[in-house]
Image: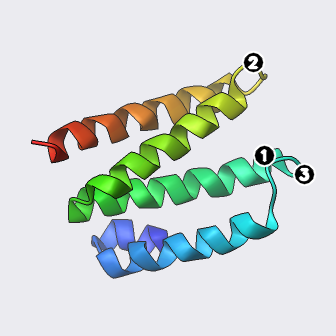
Amino acid sequence: MQALGEHEEDIASLEASIPLYDAVLKVLTRDNLPMLWAMVAANRASAMLALADESDYLDMAEASAAEFRNLVDLFDGTDYSAYKDCASEQVQRALNLIERLQV
């Protein structure tokens, strides 16, 4: 759904993907399966960022930035610095979008 929404710029598909990620994150826990949880959380945050960009939803952009910050914190001090760097880049993308939407 998310890939379709991003490729086709289909807001409805992006909106539909977020509750699916929410449902998965209710089953997975950060403590039990941290890497799998992080992948799903990153996909959810990416969908939120894409939706915010397509629809100019400031609150969605802010939520995406917060989610990516959580991922930066998760990977901080681990051997997964590439994932931390990726999440940091997404935080910056979200902050840039927030700045643009606040104007």
Residue 23 pos. (x, y %): 67, 74
Nearest the eye: 85 or 74 = 74
Residue 80's label in the rendered image is: none
Mark closest to the chain's N terminus, 2 or 3: 3
Q: Amino acid at mark 2?
A: Gly
Q: Secondary structure at mark 3?
A: loop
Q: Residues within 10 Å of mark 3 (few under 14, many from 20)?
A: few
Q: What's the residue type where badge 3 is placed?
A: Asn
Of tags 3 and 1, the one toward the viewer is 3
What SS does tag 2 mark?
Answer: loop
Residue drawn where x is 81% and y is 56% of the image: 29
Question: Among all residues in the image, which is located at the extreme right?
Answer: 32
Instruction: Out of 50 and 31, give the one closest to the viewer.
Output: 31
Q: Residue type at mark 1? A: Met
Question: Which label was assigned to residue 32?
Answer: 3
Q: Quadrant of residue 8?
A: bottom left
The number of numbered badges drawn on the structure is 3
- Left or right: 93 with respect to 67? left
* Above or below, comparing residue 99 to residue 8 in the picture: above
| Residue at point 41%, 75% (across, down) | 15
Point out residue 10 in the picture as x, y percentages from the top left corner: 30, 76
31 vs 90, nearest the viewer: 31
Cα gap from disc 3 to disc 1, whole angstroms: 9 Å
Q: Earlier in the sequence, mark 1 or mark 2?
A: 1
What residue appears at the point 36 percent right and 65 percent down from the top-left corner? 6
Q: Is residue 79 left or right of residue 66?
A: right
- Above or below, 66 relative to 73: below
What's the CA distance linking mark 1 and mark 2?
14 Å
As drawn, the label of residue 77 is: 2
Left or right: 64 as drawn, with respect to 68: left
User: Where does residue 41 sit, x and y in percent of width and height?
Assistant: 62, 54
